[in-house]
């Protein structure tokens, strides 16, 4: 950042959208957790919903609130975390809007889906990717690349091992066999969006393209938060008497731990004084 590029605060639409997101998320998760028998989903899905709600209310909401404050002050660190948690909430409420059995909060889920989608798109569009590129300078990226490729590979293998055989035999995948879901929504989101996103982000970062730093920061925060949510789901599933393969528990625990470590490393690599600046205009800045 130069003297001619003052810190760029979040504008009112982003503040309003994220504030409304916080309020609706608190309402939705609180109702889901504390109103008895609110969810009308199959018994096998309830522990996953409770785990997701608990992580969202206990971790994602406070983190988003803090990140929103610092992002509004122009902090690049805060901005990256703000985008990442918004990405987590986008994934969460896309799945709620598409997967959860219809209930009184359906429109809340749809509103959260829309708010987080357009906030994330707009938030990424307004950042100058060279801010992060310059902040990292010669910071090593192999660990971030390896982690993203590992996540993409493991998620792809996990879901393809389930939906692949089912597709060939024309049967329902085990994960939805005991539900009324017509298709496996989470697998659709993961294979269609999450896996390609992690793979492309890793490729961009490996080539040291400026946007690779942006995508990596967002996906690290989003992926780690989601990994912690999966662990919370597993706890509820075990309490409900459902069996969860030990290798799956260990894998998610290790991935979450690695993700937390890399998120901390990524955020610390950004100088505390680094600020968001206005993106380049007219294509004068090379970003890849």
Image (cartoon, rainbow, N blue to C red):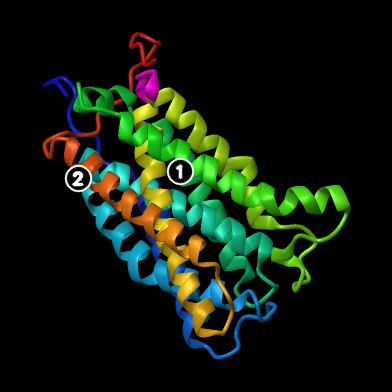
**Quick one: SS at disc 1?**
helix
The residue lying toward the viewer, choosing from 200 and 121, is 200
- The quadrant in which residue 251 appears is bottom left
Dot 2 or dot 1, earlier in sequence? 2
Identified at 28% across, 44% down, the residue is: 262
Q: Is residue 272 magenta?
A: no
| Quarter of image, res 184 | bottom right
| Left or right relative to 5: residue 10 | right
**In the rendered image of this protein, does residue 8 appear above or below residue 48?**
above
Q: Which residues are magenta?
A: 206-211
Q: Give the numbered dot on residue 174.
A: none
Residue under the image location 39 percent in, 15 percent down? 288
Report the front residue among 51 and 110.
51
Q: Position of residue 197 (x, y in %)?
A: 52, 36
User: Residue 216 is drawn in which quadrant?
Assistant: top left
User: Could you tell me which residue is drawn at 60 percent across and 44 percent down?
Assistant: 156
Q: Looking at this rendering, what residue extends furthest in the right direction?
A: 170
Q: Which residue is mark 1?
A: 120
Q: Residue at x 11, y 36 (%)?
A: 273
Q: Is residue 36 left or right of residue 11?
A: right
Q: Would residue 23 be visible to someone looking at this image? A: no
Task: Report whether 86 appears left or right of 109.
Answer: left
Query: Circle 2 is placed at which residue position?
Result: 73
Q: Position of residue 113 (x, y in %)?
A: 56, 55
Q: Can you see residue 36? A: yes
Decide: few, some or many residues near mark 1? Use Cα within 10 Å; few <14, some 14-19, many ≥20: many
Task: Report x, y in % for residue 208.
Answer: 34, 19
């Amino acid at each position: 950042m130069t003297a001619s590029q003052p810190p760029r605060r979040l504008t009112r639409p982003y503040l309003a959208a994220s504030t409304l997101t916080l309020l609706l998320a608190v309402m939705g998760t609180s109702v889901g957790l504390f109103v008895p028998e609110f969810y009308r989903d199959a018994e096998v899905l309830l522990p996953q919903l409770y785990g997701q709600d608990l992580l969202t209310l206990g971790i994602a909401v406070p983190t988003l609130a803090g990140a929103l404050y610092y992002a509004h002050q122009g902090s690049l660190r805060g901005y990256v975390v703000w985008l990442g948690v918004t990405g987590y909430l986008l994934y969460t409420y896309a799945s709620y809007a598409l997967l959860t059995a219809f209930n009184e909060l359906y429109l809340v889920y749809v509103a959260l889906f829309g708010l987080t989608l357009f906030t994330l798109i707009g938030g990424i569009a307004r950042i100058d990717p060279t801010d992060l590129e310059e902040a990292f300078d010669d910071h090593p990226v192999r660990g971030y690349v390896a982690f993203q490729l590992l996540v993409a590979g493991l998620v792809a293998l996990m879901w393809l091992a389930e939906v692949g055989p089912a597709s060939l035999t024309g049967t329902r995948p085990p994960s939805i066999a005991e539900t009324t879901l017509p298709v496996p929504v989470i697998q659709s989101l993961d294979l269609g969006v999450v896996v390609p996103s992690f793979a492309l982000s890793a490729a961009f970062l490996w080539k040291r393209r400026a946007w690779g730093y942006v995508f990596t920061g967002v996906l690290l925060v989003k992926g780690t938060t989601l990994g912690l949510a999966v662990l919370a789901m597993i706890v509820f599933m075990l309490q409900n008497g459902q069996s969860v393969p030990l290798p799956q528990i260990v894998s998610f625990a290790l991935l979450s731990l690695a993700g937390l470590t890399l998120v901390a490393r990524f955020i610390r690599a950004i100088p505390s004084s680094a600020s968001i600046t206005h993106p380049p205009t007219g294509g004068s800045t090379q970003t890849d």
